[in-house]
Amino acid sequence: WVQMGNIAKAKKQPDVAMMRYKKAVAANPKYALGFSQMGLLQMETGQLKEAVATLEKACELDPSHANTWFKYGLALEKGGRTTEATTTYEKVLRLEPEHLNAHQNLGVLQHQGNQLESAIAHYDRVLAAKEDNAGVLFNKAVALTSFGRQTEA
């Protein structure tokens, strides 16, 4: 059911995809991937409260899956729960230290929280792997500039 949900999602049929994800988790209530994909779709369709709850369930079912935790962090962040999102991205990095998207998002949140050195360290981790990442280069320059370090930007 999840694969068929993914196909429907790729065809821009979110209602069909959601129905298929729901069938997947109804058939197997411990199917973390089903909850993860359903939560991602909820987030993408603006159902943030539902997405947070669904992704939290997916994390409970498979606490070792870094990408599920990352999706959960995204939902928290989009819902304005930045302290919880920060904690969640840190968990992602404990599970998968080179998770570049978690480094990038944690860098943004730490910059917003005036933690410049930590933000720069996360941006640098991404740039060490993908030196041409325009978004991270921009974020790093903005962070440095906002803290009066324009010459380093």
Image (tube, rainbow, N blue to C red):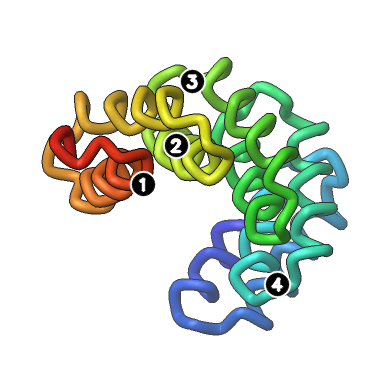
Mark 2 against mark 1, which lies toward the viewer?
A: 1
**73 lies left or right of 114:** right
Residue that numbered label 2 is attached to: 107
Q: Earlier in the sequence, mark 4 or mark 2?
A: 4
Q: Secondary structure at mark 3?
A: loop
Q: Residue at x 53, y 73 (%)?
A: 9
Work out whether mark 1 precedes mark 4 in sequence or the reverse, and give the earlier one.
4
Q: Nearer the viewer, mark 2 or mark 3?
A: 2
Q: Up-down: is 68 above or below 15?
A: above
Marks 4 and 2, how far apart in space?
32 Å
Mark 2 and mark 3: Cα distance apart in space: 16 Å
Residue under circle 4?
A: 18
Any part of residue 1 in sight: no
Q: Secondary structure at mark 4?
A: helix
Q: Position of residue 123 (x, y in %)?
A: 33, 33
Residue at 53% of width from left, 46% of height from top?
112
Q: CA distance from mark 3 to mark 1?
A: 30 Å
Q: CB atoms at circles 4 and 2 under 8 Å apart?
A: no
Q: Callout 4, which amino acid?
A: Met
Q: Residues within 10 Å of mark 2 (few under 14, many from 20)?
A: many
Q: Closer to the N terminus: mark 3 or mark 1?
A: 3
Residue bearing mark 3: 96
- Check the picture and name the quadrant holding the C terminus: top left
Q: Which mark is residue 146?
A: 1
Rendered image quadrant of residue 65? top right
